Image (cartoon, rainbow, N blue to C red):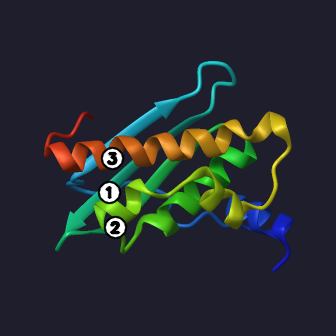
Amino acid sequence: MDQEHGLLDHYENPRNLGDLDDPDAVAIVHNPVCGDMLRLAVRYEDARISLARFKGYGCAAAIAAGSVVTELLIGTSLQEASSLSDEDITAVLGPLPPMKVHAVVLARETIASVVAQLKSGEPEA
């Protein structure tokens, strides 16, 4: 699969779109500059993120990044999840124009938020 197809595929066929009943952590991250928003809900069982769902609003890159994040998170420990980087997300999406890199940052920030909640045991949303 070529790199451009990664973004288009995740935008046109988003994975894990929707919500979870009784999530263990929920993050809502908003970019006030462009208006993009991601909501990430996860379930944490047996020391692993077992389910992840997202809802997004904004550009194609933000929607695709939300989809990618759910796939990267499912099955990870908190340590593995917290080590996910912009480069990990971009490796799946493919190269983005500079004005769209904010979508990757938004996605990584949702990961950081749910990991922090799971580590503290206190959901923020």
- Residue 68's place in the image compared with 99, above or below, is below
Report the residue that reaches farthest toward the bottom. 1
Q: Are marks 3 and 2 in contact (CB under 8 Å)?
A: no
Task: Give the residue type that dot 2 points to.
Answer: Leu
**Which tag is nearer the camera, tag 1 or tag 3?**
3
Amino acid type, mark 1: Val
The residue indicated by pointer 2 is 51
Q: Contact (CB < 8 A) between labels 2 and 1?
A: yes
Q: Position of residue 57 (x, y in %)?
A: 60, 38
Q: Any mark on residue 42, and which?
A: 1
Q: Is residue 123 rendered to the left or right of residue 73?
A: left
Q: Which of 116 and 35 is in front in this view?
A: 116
Instruction: Find residue 31 and report its image quarter.
Output: top right
Mark 2 vs mark 1, CA separation in Å: 5 Å
**Mark 1 or mark 2, which is nearer the start of the sequence?**
1
Q: Quadrant of residue 59?
A: top right
Circle 1 crowding by C-alpha within 10 Å: few under 14, some 14–19, many from 20: many
Disc 3 packing (10 Å; few <14; some 14–19; many ≥20): many
Helix, strand or loop at disc 3? Answer: helix
Asked whether the beta carbons under mark 1 and mark 3 sit within 8 Å of each other, the answer is: yes
Picture residue at 51% right of the left edge, 68% below the top: 71
Q: Where is residue 98 in the image (x, y as percent from the top left)?
A: 83, 38
The quarter of the picture where the N terminus appears is bottom right
Q: Is residue 122 left or right of residue 20?
A: left
| Quadrant in the rendering for residue 112 | top left
| Helix, strand or loop status at disc 1 | strand
